[in-house]
Image (cartoon, grey):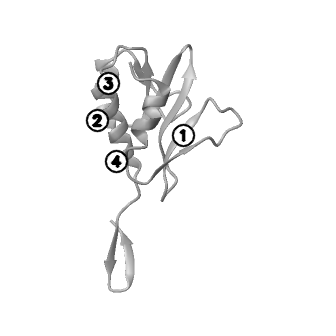
Amino acid sequence: MMTREEAIVYCLTFKEVREDYPFKDTNWTLMRHKENKKAFACIYMREGHIWINVKCDPEWRDFWRGAYASVVPAYHMNKEHWNSIILDGSIKEEDIKRMIEESYALTQPKKKKIRGNIAIDE
């Protein structure tokens, strides 16, 4: 079963990521993109387990919720776009990593295209 520390270390393997503790409650760790400062994973202890909130494509949201009882609508987040992963040992580690990776991709900075001397978001 993945631990809090292992989840943080895994998140730090992505490019241009930082670990952040923006709240007075140090239970909440946010994993953010350095460039746009968007969080792609919120890691915290709740009800005796580590939880990870991840952004997900609405097409996959219900798939993950149906595949695992420990993937639920996100605690304290928009439930249409975010899931909570409860690390209780019932979810395959490769699936946890896949959900974190998808969240990272969905929140990463938009790439800029240069046209002439003007930068345009893609």
Per the model, the C-alpha gap separating discs 4 and 2 is 15 Å
- The x and y percentages for residue 62 are 32, 27
Residue furthest to the bottom in view is 116
Residue 43 appears in the figure: yes
Task: Answer with mark 3 or mark 2, whichever residue precedes in sequence.
Answer: 2
Q: Amino acid at mark 2?
A: Glu
Task: Answer with mark 4 or mark 2, whichever residue precedes in sequence.
Answer: 2
In screen coordinates, is 77 left or right of 103?
A: right
Q: Amino acid at mark 4?
A: Ala
Task: Answer with mark 4 or mark 3, whichever residue precedes in sequence.
Answer: 3
- Badge 3 vs badge 2, beta-carbon distance below 8 Å: no
Which residue lies under the disc numbered 3?
93
Per the model, the C-alpha gap separating discs 2 and 1 is 24 Å
Give the structural element (helix, strand or loop) at label 4. Answer: helix
**4 vs 2, front mark:** 4
Per the model, the C-alpha gap separating discs 3 and 2 is 21 Å
Which residue lies under the disc numbered 4?
105
Q: Amino acid at mark 1?
A: Leu
Q: Residues within 10 Å of mark 3 (few under 14, many from 20)?
A: few
- What residue do we see at 28% from left, 35% from top? 59
In screen coordinates, is 45 left or right of 13?
A: right
Q: Quadrant of the N terminus?
A: top left
Which residue lies under the disc numbered 2?
59
- What residue do we see at 33% from left, 19% from top? 91
Task: Answer with mark 3 or mark 1, whichever residue precedes in sequence.
Answer: 1
